[in-house]
Structures are given as C-alpha cells and as structure tokens.
Image (tube, grey):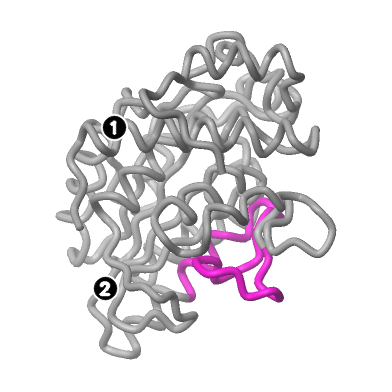
Amino acid sequence: MSKSIEELKSLATQIRRDILRMVHDVNSGHPGGSLGCTEFFTALYGKVLNYHLPFTMEGKNEDHFYLSNGHISPVFYSTLARFGFFPVEELKTFRKLNSRLQGHPTTHEGLPGIRVASGSLGQGLSVALGAALGKKLDGDQSLVYSLHGDGELQEGQIWEALMFAAAKKVDNIISTIDYNGRQIDGDTDDVLSLGDLHAKLEAFGWTVLEEKNGNDLEAVIAILERAKAETGKGKPVAIMLHTEMGAGVDYMMGSHAWHGKAPNDEQLEAAFKQLYLEAPADY
C-alpha cells in the first residue's frame, strides 16, 4: 500500500530512532552518514523503487539497489525491516555474534534485501554496472540504483567504472552520491578534494542531476523521479545529493565526528527528544 508523504516523514523519524538505538546498544557503528541518508532510503523504498516481496536474489523484472558505502548499514537495515523485508525485532541483533545484521552488509546468511556484500569502498559501482548489464542481456526493463559516499569517490576503481558505464552506454543505472562533504578523517576538501565533481561526472559522459536539499523528503523523491525520466537515453545517470551528516540530531551535525561513533545513554536520550513520535515505537 502506498504511503502518504506525511506517513513517510513519520517513518523517516522512526528510522532515525532505529539507527541511534542500534549503534547505542552495541556502542559501535556509523550513525552520521546513516542519519544523513534517511530521506534517500525512505524515498527510494517508499516511492521510487519497484520491488516485490518476498525477496528473491534474482529479482527478475524488479529494480535492484546496491549500497556501496556499506558502513551506513544501520539505515539500510532499518529501512528494509520497516518496509517488510524481515522482522523489525531482528534489528536488536545488529553487530552481534551470529547475527545476519553485521556492521557491513553480507550475503552468506541470506538477509532479505541484500544482494552483495559491501563496505570495501570503491567497488559498488562496478557491481551495480554488472547487474545493469545483466538486466539488458535478459531483456529486463527495470532499473539498477546504487549509493556511494563522496569520500568513496577518492577510490580509483570508481573512476574506471564511471568511464566504463558511459563507454558502454549503460543507461539503466542511477547512481546517487551522498554529497555531505565529510568522511572519517575530516572534510573531504581537506582529505582529498573532489574539485568540481559535477563537471567531472559530465566530462566522463554521465547525465548529472543535483539536489541541494538532500534531507527534504519531497525534494529527494522529486530528484529520483527526474533521474528515472533520464534513463534509457544512452547515458548513465548520476545524482549529487547534498545531505548533512547526522541530520536530525543537532549535536551530530556540522562535523565528521559522528561518522563512526555511538551515542552514550545521555546523548541517546537527547537525540530521542528531538525525534519525537506521537507513539514512539521500539523494536
């Protein structure tokens, strides 16, 4: 059943609560980027992605999504659970021994919604392109989506894949860059500047869209729909999605400090007060 924008906004708040609770419970994980990408995941699974349940690995005639920056697994796991891929109760097992919800997504335990192990940065675009080409060979008209961190674009394999996608006219892929300007060691401009990324992507032969309000749910839905309209025209499509690391929790925003740090008890309580729901749901 399709959800309204207001229902999706409420769900995004719940996903943020899940993220914080998950990393707090094990004092481990990556809340910053997960919080920043909450609107993207909510929009993708709530309005844009064509998928079927129960999940199948082949996913014939349905859209595929590949998370390249796998360290933001908390937002991915919460989204999958809240959209019915597996029980919400399983979120309690995040990063615990023998759990299907490891720090980076894996496939050997068969977690629904996960088609590839990820987290080794720079590899996800190559995987997504392989899936997109496979769909073309199968005569499958559905699309492939991928998500990448901006710091991840410092990896050389990304640029080989960008070049390959344009050269082979892989026009059934939409790759989004979480453009928050921060990575584990600091601001991307300080660690290794990406320069004029928009111009670089265009020079590599991609159609490039840009959204400055990456934490506005309606804006994210709109840019994803615009991207869909650009597929099938002989060029791969990229979205530069400007987000705020730690979005929704004031003390986590404006810094790279919460890239990979869990909140303590007091910080969790302070965050939850900002993420109020009329009927706050635990796992």
Please give the residue where the numbered disc 1 appears in the rendered image.
217
Q: Amino acid at mark 2?
A: Ser
* Mark positioned earlier in the residue sequence (1 or 2): 2
Above or below residue 11? Residue 170 is: below
Q: Nearer the viewer, mark 1 or mark 2?
A: 1
Above or below residue 45? Residue 57 is: below
Badge 2: few (under 14), some or many (20 or more) residues near its Cα, within 10 Å? some
Instruction: Left or right? Give the position of 36 relative to 22.
Output: left
- Give the residues in magenta: 106-130
Distance between the alpha carbons at the discs numbered 1 and 2: 23 Å
**Residue ID at (26%, 46%):** 224
Q: Percent x, y for residue 2? A: 18, 53
Q: Amino acid at mark 1?
A: Leu
Instruction: Left or right? Give the position of 140 relative to 73.
Output: left
**Residue ID at (46%, 20%):** 275
Badge 1: few (under 14), some or many (20 or more) residues near its Cα, within 10 Å? many
Please give the residue where the numbered disc 2 appears in the rendered image.
142
Q: Percent x, y for residue 200? A: 43, 40
Magenta segment's dominant SS is: loop
